[in-house]
Amino acid sequence: SCTAWLPNTEPLWQELLVLRELRADSYAASQVDPLVLAESLLLVVSSNPLSSEICCAALGSPSADRLEQRVEALLAPPEPTPEAQLHSWHGFMLAFLPLVTVIFHS
């Protein structure tokens, strides 16, 4: 690998994979019942292993922590999405205040 000299390359790559899988699971759970999705993950892992070139989702990874983390995230109650706050727009408008004052200087 061309990035082998960088520190913590492998742990960062593994964390990126986990976050990507969790995001994909979250999207799938919005389309299908999360319990069914968790069951299907367990069925895929418990079935006969595929060749490592085909299995890109790292379901066959040696640590069961990744699978456990995915199943727990699926079965956890969904976090409420924060609504757009009015004060965030104030900060946005405040950022453009200097541009508005240019009009009055001419």
Image (cartoon, rainbow, N blue to C red):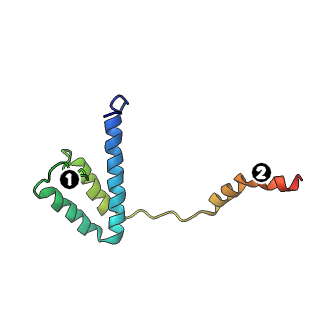
Horizontal relation, residue 42 to residue 33: left or right: left
Apparent side of residue 50 relative to residue 104 in the rendered image (left or right): left
Q: Amino acid at mark 2?
A: Pro
* On screen, residue 100 above or below 61: below
Q: Work out whether 10 lies above or below 39.
A: above
Could you give the CA–CA distance between mark 1 and mark 2, rounded to whole angstroms?
A: 55 Å
Residue 80 in view of the camera: yes
Foreground residue among 16 and 35: 16
Question: Could you say which quadrant of the image residue 32 lies in?
Answer: bottom left
Residue under the point 31% across and 37% down: 10
Per the image, label 2 sits on a secondary structure element best described as helix
Q: Which residue is most to the left? A: 48
Residue drawn at point x = 16 percent, y = 62 percent: 43
Residue 52 position in % (x across, y down) = 18, 48
* Residue position for label 1: 54
Q: Which of the marked residues, 1 or 2, is nearer the chain's N terminus?
A: 1
10 Å crowding of disc 2: few (<14), some (14-19), many (20+): few
In the picture of the structure, the residue carrying the numbered disc 2 is 98
Q: Which of labels 1 and 2 is toward the front? A: 1
Q: Secondary structure at mark 1?
A: loop
